[in-house]
Image (spheres, grey):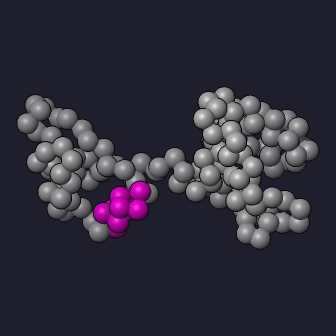
Amino acid sequence: MLAGWCDRAGDWSSGLSGVPDAVKMAVQMNMIQPVLVFRGSLAALVLAWTVVPMPAQASLQLALEKGCYGCHGEPPRRNTPSFAQLAADYAKYRGQADAPHKLADKLRAGTLFGHIAAHERVSPQECETLMRWLIDGAR
């Protein structure tokens, strides 16, 4: 974890001295997020940089780790929908809090696209994360 001082809330410039350029770039690209932490008194506000993947970035990484791009990448395999197609289809579920859970259960049970072994091997939590990512546009 890297730490730098921040003079006041919202003033990141003074807190970036000593932070590697790669970390600064990752923050600017929204790949990681800075976390404000209070230590001691309120006068000692510490800006603690932690590598916290953004939800979309984490889901993209999960899709890569699970091999989803083998079928759903560009170009998609045979009659398989691409992630862009799936995201467009699942956009109708945005704002429905229970949709990722319900869709994940259906996917793992084989009622969405038939019994696909790769879908059934994904854990319920991972599947729900991937469904939420798709609903949010797969970006």
User: How many numbered discs sit on the rendered protein?
Assistant: 0
Q: Is residue 130 visible?
A: no
Question: Quadrant of residue 83 in the image?
Answer: bottom right
Q: Is residue 59 visible?
A: yes
Q: Residue 50 appears at what percent x and percent y?
A: 34, 49
Magenta span has 57? no
Report the residue at 15% width, 49% height from top.
Answer: 6
Judged left or right of residue 45, residue 26 is right
The vertical placement of 138 against 18, above or below, is above
Q: Residue at x 62, y 30 (%)?
A: 97
Between 92 and 121, the one nearer to me in the picture: 92
Q: Which region of the structure is painted magenta?
A: 22-30
Taking the view exactly as shown, the residue that stands out farthest to the right is 114
In this view, 67 is above or below 130: below
Drawn side of residue 19 relative to residue 86, left or right: left
The residue at 70%/59% (across/down) is 84
Who's the residue at 21% across and 54% down the image?
12
Whether residue 29 appears in magenta in the rendering, the answer is: yes
> Where residue 112 sits in the image (x, y, percent)?
85, 41
The answer to whether residue 119 is above or below residue 38 is: below
Q: Main secondary structure of the magenta part?
A: helix
Q: Which residue lies most toward the left here?
A: 43
Front residue of this view, candidates 130 and 64: 130
Of residue 94 and residue 80, the one placed in the foreground of this image is 94
Q: Is residue 34 left or right of residue 18?
A: right
Location of residue 78 in the rendering, given as x and y in whole percent from the top left corner: 89, 66
Residue 8, image quadrant: top left
State the residue lying farthest toward the top: 98
Quadrant containing the C terminus is bottom right
